Amino acid sequence: MEFQLPALSADMEYATVGRWLKQEGDSLRKDEPLLEIEADKATEELAAPASGTLREILAVEGDEVKVGAVLAIIDGAS
């Protein structure tokens, strides 16, 4: 499944990717912290939307990404 950047507020359009808390190949549990993003002058943790394996990270630290952009691919999502 594609893990996309959600809108964390009504006026949020972009965010900056902070630190990934998991690496490619790591197992994920739903709602487990996955990465940090910087938006609206605050740092927020984004949780894994499903359990599975983090197959590929598409947005690296420092990237500015638009809401809805694909951040990563999760295999075996359940």
Image (cartoon, rainbow, N blue to C red):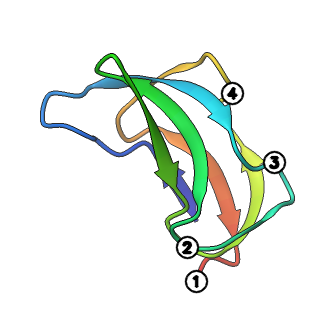
From the viewer's side, name the closer residue of 15 and 55.
Answer: 15
Q: Nearer the viewer, mark 1 or mark 2?
A: 2
Q: Name the residue under label 2.
A: 30
Report how far apart the C-alphas of labels 1 and 2 lie in the structure.
8 Å
Report how far apart the C-alphas of labels 1 and 3 lie in the structure.
19 Å
Crowd band around label 1 with a 10 angstrom C-alpha radius: few (<14), some (14–19), many (20+): few
Residue sitting at x 72%, y 42%: 57
Task: Name the amino acid, label 2.
Answer: Lys
Task: Name the amino acid, label 3.
Answer: Gln
Residue 49: x percent and y percent?
49, 65
Task: Name the amino acid, label 1.
Answer: Ser
Q: Name the residue under label 4.
A: 60
Secondary structure category for the residue under label 4: loop
Report how far apart the C-alphas of labels 2 and 4 lie in the structure.
21 Å
Query: To which quarter of the image does residue 41 belong?
Result: top left
Residue 30: x percent and y percent?
55, 73
Tell me the number on the disc at residue 78.
1
Crowd band around label 2 with a 10 angstrom C-alpha radius: few (<14), some (14–19), many (20+): some
Residue sitting at x 81%, y 48%: 23
Secondary structure category for the residue under label 2: loop
- In-image side of 9 versus 31 (left or right): left
Q: Which of marks 4 and 3 is in front?
A: 3
Q: Which of marks 1 and 3 is nearer the N terminus?
A: 3
Report how far apart the C-alphas of labels 3 and 2 lie in the structure.
16 Å
Task: Name the amino acid, label 4.
Answer: Val
Q: Mark 3 points at which residue?
A: 23
Report how far apart the C-alphas of labels 4 and 1 lie in the structure.
24 Å
Q: Earlier in the sequence, mark 2 or mark 4?
A: 2
Q: Do the residues labelled 1 and 2 touch (CB within 8 Å)?
A: yes
